[in-house]
Amino acid sequence: MLSATRRAVWAQSRSRLAQPSCPAYSFSPSALRRLASSLAILEQRDGKLNHGSLSAITAAQKLGGSVHAFVAGSNVKPVAEEAAKVDGVEKIIAVENAAYEKGLPENYAPLLVENIKKGGYTHIIAGHTAFGKNLLPRVAALLDSQQISDITGIENETTFVRPIYAGNAIATVESSDPVKVITIRGTAFAPAEVASGSAAVEDGVDSKPESPTEWVSEELAKSDRPDLATAGKVVSGGRGLKSKEEFDRIMQPLADSLGAAIGASRAAVDSGYADNSLQVGQTGKVVAPQMYMAVGISGAIQHLAGMKDSKVIAAINKDADAPIFQVADVGLVGDLFEKVPELTEKLKKA
Ligand SMILES: Cc1cc2nc3c(=O)[nH]c(=O)nc-3n(C[C@H](O)[C@H](O)[C@H](O)COP(=O)(O)OP(=O)(O)OC[C@H]3O[C@@H](n4cnc5c(N)ncnc54)[C@H](O)[C@@H]3O)c2cc1C
């Protein structure tokens, strides 16, 4: 076993985004502080709340001021009622209309803007997920705001922290836009807990904006394993696995023995070893589980961008100089085809 101290190589930089202020909202910073009111955008599928999206409520609560949440789709009443139990949320705005079920930004964005204008919100917050990344840029454009993406920290209601250059630098950005449109990194804000709250559930406005886009179909990878984005343990395979057959043969029993989700490097995904929904990294999912095990992954900077905040990082690689060992807390140098089945057997007996 080779242990390596995780190196803090992430440089700090500060940048300021000065935005022209809008006369209609030309309040002093202290007045803004008093008026802060946030709208957290919730995600749902088939009438079930996506609990990961409750991170948007946590971020909204950090800002202070009033917190409302928004959800739209068909059969969203149960979602709204569940979210109403989050402590500290004053109101859930629900729009019941099948046209928004799939979150198509073409009609969802104007719907959201109508509701933002009606509520006079100062901060709009969604997860930096496929849904949030698809939707909020349109919302920001419609509001003539500069979007603030993928934040990991909130300094105050105008100043936010976000990683740039695949996490190699941390920028602190300040916005003077009257409405801040923000996506948050889920791993930086724990989902708010559904507890004993009793927020009011209210129907939102819906002028039924037309969408030029039609939802045709989707093919979802089904799995009984824990969800990669929120799992407590993740085992990820890379190009070192050599083929899809070997990826499945080696990684599935390892994941089963740990009760872990499976992830993959982009090289493994591009080579067809794993589904692209499993990609971890700059252009994949960002995860921060209690334990992340990288198997046959070199540790390219774009991969590290998606897992470096994991609490414990373990790596198995035959190359002792592989960069993954620079961020690993625990490393094993050896042939994965020999070491992983051995480890899996030991875990099964433990
Ligand atoms: C714009 C951009 C975005 C990107 N986004 C991502 C992203 O989101 N996620 C991502 O992962 N990558 C991303 N990449 C790609 C990234 O740069 C790397 O190419 C990729 O991460 C490499 O994947 P890998 O580590 O599996 O493969 P390799 O770099 O080929 O590493 C394979 C490793 O397996 C080891 N190995 C081989 N055989 C064995 C064996 N028998 N036993 C043990 N170890 C073995 C080797 O020593 C090597 O370290 C991006 C690149 C660009 C340019």
Image (spheres, rainbow, N blue to C red):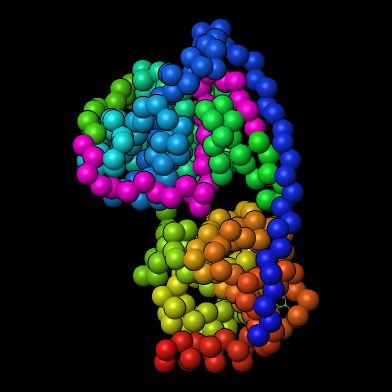
Q: Residue at x 60, y 20 (%)?
A: 176
Q: Position of residue 51 (x, y in %)?
A: 35, 50
Q: Nearer the viewer, residue 6 or 114?
A: 6
Q: Nearer the viewer, residue 41 or 258?
A: 258
The answer to whether residue 215 shows anywhere in this view is no
Q: Nearer the viewer, residue 122 or 256?
A: 122
Residue 233 to residue 342: above or below: above
Q: Residue at x 56, y 41 (%)?
A: 153
Q: Position of residue 275 (x, y in %)?
A: 53, 66
- Main SS category, magenta section: loop
Residue 178 belongs to the span the image colors magenta:
yes
Residue 199 belongs to the span the image colors magenta:
no
Q: Residue at x 59, y 30 (%)?
A: 159
Q: Residue at x 40, y 70 (%)?
A: 225
**Relative to 224, is 185 on the left or the right?**
right
Segment colored magenta: 173-198
Residue 170 to residue 268: above or below: above
The image quadrant in which ligand 1 is located:
bottom right
Q: Residue furthest top?
A: 23
Q: Position of residue 171 (x, y in %)?
A: 68, 39
The answer to whether residue 122 shows anywhere in this view is yes
Q: Quadrant of the N terminus?
A: bottom right
Q: Residue furthest right?
A: 321
**Relative to 219, is 319 on the left or the right?**
right
